[in-house]
Image (spheres, helix red, strand yellow):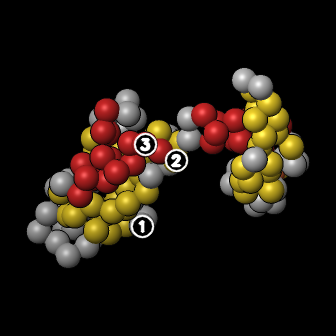
Amino acid sequence: MTELTCIVCPVGCRIRVDRDGNGLKITGNGCPRGLTYAREEMTAPQRTLTAVVEVAGSDCMLPVKTKVAIPKAKIWAAMQEIKAITVHPPVTIGQVLKEDLAGSGVALVATGTIDQDEKRENL
Ligand code: SF4
């Protein structure tokens, strides 16, 4: 038996997952989204990764995130790639900074804007 807290919405249902033959018996979810979450969490867990990257010639950092969730197993490799990134202004919110992060097939995008003078906007 495994207990999970659903992170899909603020309700935070406690979901119980039991092995049932070759399948899973999932209970405690308040809605169908929790069922999907629990099934994915038990078979192929994923997370949207947020971090910051260095800005060339500046002390400020630029917030970034994966465009969508990536496999949890790739998060360490993704963080190593993110640590090596330095962006050069200007950078616009939503701009792709790296395609196929850690071989996940998912892009890393900026979640803030930095103008040519390295002045942060929309952070
Ligand atoms: S199971 Fe449904 S209601 Fe419960 S936390 Fe998840 S999304 Fe929200």
Up/down of 73 relative to 24, above or below: below
Extreme residue toward the top, this view:
22
Tag 3, which secondary structure?
Answer: helix
Amino acid, disc 2: Arg
Amino acid, disc 1: Leu
Tag 1, which secondary structure?
Answer: loop
Q: Earlier in the sequence, mark 2 or mark 1?
A: 2
- Whether residue 67 is visible to the viewer of this picture, yes or no, is no
- The residue wearing badge 3 is 73
Cβ at disc 2 under 8 Å from ligand 1: no
How many labels were placed on the picture? 3
Instruction: Tell me whether circle 2 and circle 1 mark residues in contact (CB < 8 Å).
Output: no
Q: Position of residue 93 (x, y in %)?
A: 39, 52
Mark 3 nearby-residue class (10 Å; few <14, some 14–19, many ≥20): few
Say which quarter of the image contains residue 35.
top right
Answer with left or right where residue 62 lies relative to residue 24.
left
Mark 2 nearby-residue class (10 Å; few <14, some 14–19, many ≥20): some
Tag 2, which secondary structure?
Answer: strand
Q: Where is residue 33 in the image (x, y as percent from the top left)?
A: 77, 40
- The residue wearing badge 1 is 123
Distance from disc 3 to disc 2, alpha carbons, whole Å, reads 10 Å
Distance from disc 3 to disc 1, alpha carbons, whole Å, reads 29 Å
Nearer to us of marks 2 and 1 is 2
- The residue wearing badge 2 is 47
Mark 1 nearby-residue class (10 Å; few <14, some 14–19, many ≥20): few
Residue ID at (71%, 42%): 38
Distance from disc 2 to disc 1, alpha carbons, whole Å, reads 22 Å
